[in-house]
Amino acid sequence: MIARHLVDVHVLLTRQDEILLSLRRSGDEFDARWHLPAGKLEAGEPAARGAAREAAEETGVEIDPADLRLVHTAHVVSPTRDSRLGLFFHTERWSGTPENREPDKSYELRWFPLDALPDALIRYPALGIAGWRAGVPYSEFGWAE
């Protein structure tokens, strides 16, 4: 069988010099670690629309997909998880007030200064945030040298 890659969409919601993160609630090694609003792209769904959908499902904010700008792509592989391509979209425009809409998947949402991100930030979203801030459009993680 040929391995397939999942496509994840992530949203970097920022205001002034802060970014919104979600504290994951899960039964794995990522429990109580910080992540961006994100999820898997659904079949037949355009990526920007999927990112806006995920942000709405997780935070309650409404984003026009036209206001999302692709800022980083990460190609991530792991021996214990499905391989994936992560698309990171940035926006400073949305309507509504972010609130935790998925308490079964997230302990809380919190704004963090961009220059003081939490130590417990999962490496995958950290790649996207760092790539966006540095203007680097692509990264790879987990591949053998």
Image (cartoon, rainbow, N blue to C red):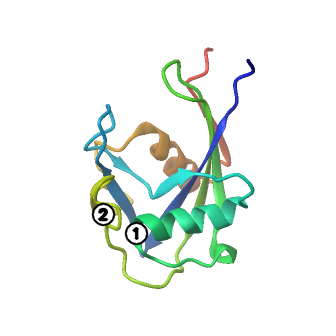
Instruction: Determine crowd level at label 1: few under 14, some 14-19, many 20+ residues with C-alpha closer than 10 A.
Output: many
Q: Is residue 52 above or below residue 32?
A: below
Q: Residue furthest top?
A: 145
Instruction: Determine crowd level at label 2: few under 14, some 14-19, many 20+ residues with C-alpha closer than 10 A.
Output: many
Image quadrant in which the N terminus is located: top right
- The residue beneath circle 1 is 59
Q: What element carries label 1?
A: helix
Give residue 23's position: percent from left, percent from top: 29, 52
Kind of residue sitting beneath label 1 = Thr
Residue under the point 70% across and 30% down: 4
Looking at the picture, tell me which residue is in the foreground, 62 or 125: 62
Q: Is residue 6 above or below residue 145?
A: below
Q: In this view, does 34 lie above or below 30?
A: below
Give residue 71's position: percent from left, percent from top: 64, 57
Callouts 2 and 1 close, C-beta under 8 Å? yes
Image quadrant in which the C terminus is located: top right
- The residue beneath circle 2 is 109
Using the image, tell me which numbered label, if any, was put on residue 20.
Answer: none
Q: What element carries label 2?
A: strand
Q: In this view, does 144 lie above or below 40?
A: above
Residue under the point 38% across and 64% down: 20
Is 127 on the left-hand or right-hand side of 75? Answer: left
